[in-house]
Image: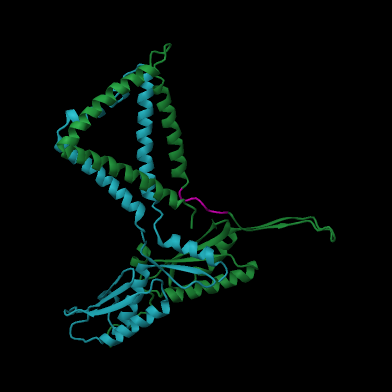
Chain colours: A cyan, B green
Amino acid sequence: MTHPALYRRILRRETHSPRATIAISVAIVLIVVFAWIGTESVLALLGRPALLVAPADALTSTLAIPTALLPSAIIGGGAVVALIGLLLFLVAVLPGRRARHTGLVGRTAVVVDNAVIASALARTASNTANIDPDQVIVTIGHRSADVRVQPTSGYSVNHERITTAVQGQLETLELTPALRSTVTIEQKGVVGA
Amino acid sequence: MNNTNRALNRLGLLLLGLVLLVIGSAAAVAAANPDWFERWQSLATTVETASNDVVAATTLDGLGQSWLLILIPVLALVLIVLLLAFAFRQGQGHARALVTEKVTPNTEQPSPGGSIVVEGKVAEQAIRQALDSHPEIVSSSVSTYLVAKTPALRITTQVRRGASPQVVRAYIDETVAAWDGLLGREVPVLIQINGGFATRTAKASRVSSPSIHP
């Protein structure tokens, strides 16, 4: 391993969301709001008519909220504002993991999309069971690989062989975090596959 | 691999989220509680008279307007510039040069000195060409980034449906080893193996697909 610290940094960043989209969206909203406030102030300074609300009127109506509005309306509005705040707070605090797993770091570092792991496991399972890859549905979680096999009607599939093959492939993949596989054989088979 | 300031993104969202959460819940709670609601109403009247005083105190004689109306646009402009800088700072970090070497003039053996630059484009084209010949790789792209001041390569591949990630990685590792030999040094390399639309629509490789029923 030539650059351990650098690879650790790269892999952490590749498996977590940068929160760039929401940060840019929020920045754009704030830019619009500040541009509007600035414009209204300049128009008021020049004695021109306001675009929407003059700054003095805006201040008065903000202060008039408790007298002009019904308490129920204030509770509703406050709850909506608090909910938006809670969502932004959660986005900031939650890890924001991407659907990716990392492999062993050697000369290179690798991140593998969960969809790729799923389709590789589906191919292994379908090869072992000798069925079409479309008859296998794989769901990859953070630590689990759920393989559902739908056998062809009239043919039996070997549960144990599929489990061994899938587990064997997961071991050669050496993913972090490691995936634990469960293989389920569906009761209903596919007709005419 | 870009140098987006993720901590700043999260800090900004955290602060704004907390402000909205506090204002919203404070308003809702105050409105729900009659005692607090009365206090809020009397506070609003106090603030109104106070703000009238402030406007009167800051009014300029020559202008007939409060100088707050000059201060607010200036502040708004500063904040807009900062927010624009913040937004455009996202996703930066591409680099042109993969290797930059300064050759210092040697006093004992006369040498002119100078610098050697290997552009990332060289690696990008060489590696891409090697990767595209692999049957399990639908497409690939290689780009150069500056990660913590170190130039690094990122190899992104779209693989065929059912392709084994370890086989694809082993092949890319071989290609990288060949490139290392060519360059004479090891730059950090990130391999990204992707599925996505191309994988879903691409046919499974015909060589390794099984016969369906005996």
Q: Residue at x 37, y 61 (%)?
A: A98
Q: Looking at the image, which residue is at 38% across and 42% down?
A: A27
Highlighted range, magenta: B90-95
Front-most of residues B180 and A69: A69
How many numbered discs sit on the rendered protein? Answer: 0
On the image, the x and y values in percent for residue A70 come to 14, 33
Location of residue A109 in the rendering, given as x and y in whole percent from the top left corner: 49, 68
Would residue B42 be found to the left or right of residue A112 on screen?
left
In this view, A187 is above or below A7 = below
Q: Could you tell me residue A87's position as x and y percent? A: 29, 50
Residue B118 position (above or below residue A65)? below
- Between B206 and B34, the one nearer to me in the picture: B34
Quadrant in which residue B136 is drawn:
bottom left
Q: Is residue A112 above or below residue B74?
A: below
Tell me what residue is drawn at x 17 percent, y 80 percent.
Answer: A187
Percent across and percent down for residue B103 are 74, 58
Depth order, front residue of B149/B37: B37
**Residue A137 visible in the snapshot:** yes
Give the prevailing secondary structure in the magenta stretch.
Answer: loop
Residue B92 sits inside the magenta stretch? yes
Q: Residue furthest top?
A: B62
Q: Which part of the image, by quadrant, shows the N terminus of chain A?
A: bottom right
Q: Is residue A57 visible?
A: no
Residue A49 sits inside the magenta stretch: no
Question: In the picture, which quadrant includes the C terminus of chain A?
Answer: bottom left
Q: Quadrant of residue B150?
A: bottom right
Q: Is residue B118 left or right of residue A87?
A: right
